[in-house]
């Protein structure tokens, strides 16, 4: 099992791991994904700040370390309890970067944890379309993230 610094949100068909340094927008973007009321499309928290990853049957599963399960740090508010899931199948890793580091037409990239390769994309968390972009990628792939 690996423990990584990041925030993980279950978007239905697959979960998304948001990575980036402090202040990069992990919890902010996660909150927007959870709070999206458009058609009951809200995601569910898997874990905020630290995520445990375990390989099972060729897939990577994300969960929260027990002491922080169901807790989320919201800048300017504090630590709050939010609805969460115990575990979710990870389908995408997202590195949160400044806008200048987001390619207009990116080449497909991957990263691996516990011997399982996953698609990797770069995104600016503070762009208003960031949550919509993640939902688009997850829905288009129906849980199996494939980017061409």
Image: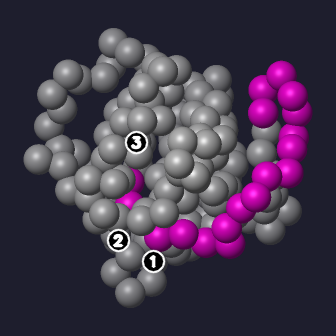
Instruction: Name the side, left or right, on which 97 lies relative to 109.
Output: right
* Front in this rendered view, residue 24 or 84: 84
The answer to whether 65 is drawn above or below residue 27 in the figure is below
Residue found farthest to the left: 148
Q: Identify the residue at horizontal 77%, vertical 45% (top origin).
A: 72
Magenta stretch: includes residue 101: no
Label 1 sits on a secondary structure element that is strand
* Front in this rendered view, residue 67 or 82: 82
Q: Identify the residue at horizontal 31%, vertical 47% (top origin).
A: 137
Q: Residues within 10 Å of mark 3 (few under 14, many from 20)?
A: some
Q: Are marks 2 and 1 in contact (CB under 8 Å)?
A: yes
Q: Quadrant of residue 124?
A: top left
Which residue, given by chain and number where applicable, does mark 1 sit on?
55
Q: Earlier in the sequence, mark 2 or mark 3?
A: 2
Instruction: Name the side, left or right, on which 72 lies relative to 20.
Output: right
Q: Earlier in the sequence, mark 3 or mark 1?
A: 1
Residue 117 at least partly seen: no
Q: Quadrant of residue 67?
A: bottom right
The answer to whether 112 is drawn above or below residue 132 in the figure is below
The residues colored magenta run 74-92
Residue found farthest to the bottom: 57
Q: Are marks 3 and 1 in contact (CB under 8 Å)?
A: no
* Front in this rendered view, residue 80 or 98: 80
Disc on res. 134: 3
Instruction: Name the side, left or right, on which 47 lies relative to 12.
Output: right
Q: Identify the residue at horizontal 47%, vertical 35% (top origin).
A: 131
Instruction: Name the side, left or right, on which 17 lies relative to 44.
Output: left
Residue 146 at least partly seen: yes
Disc on res. 115: 2
Q: CA distance from mark 2 to mark 3?
A: 24 Å
Label 2 sits on a secondary structure element that is loop
Q: How many marks?
A: 3
């Amino acid at each position: 099992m690996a423990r990584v610094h990041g925030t993980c949100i279950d978007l239905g068909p697959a979960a998304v791991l948001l990575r980036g340094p402090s202040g990069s927008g992990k919890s902010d973007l996660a909150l927007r994904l959870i709070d999206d009321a458009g058609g009951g499309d809200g995601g569910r928290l898997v874990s905020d700040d630290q995520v445990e990853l375990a390989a099972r049957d060729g897939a990577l599963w994300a969960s929260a370390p027990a002491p922080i399960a169901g807790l989320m740090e919201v800048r300017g508010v504090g630590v709050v309890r939010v609805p969460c899931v115990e575990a979710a199948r990870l389908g995408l890793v997202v590195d949160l970067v400044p806008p200048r580091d987001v390619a207009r037409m990116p080449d497909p990239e991957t990263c691996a944890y516990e011997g399982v390769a996953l698609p990797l994309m770069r995104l600016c968390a503070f762009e208003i379309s960031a949550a919509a972009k993640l939902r688009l990628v997850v829905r288009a792939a129906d849980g199996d993230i494939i980017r061409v």
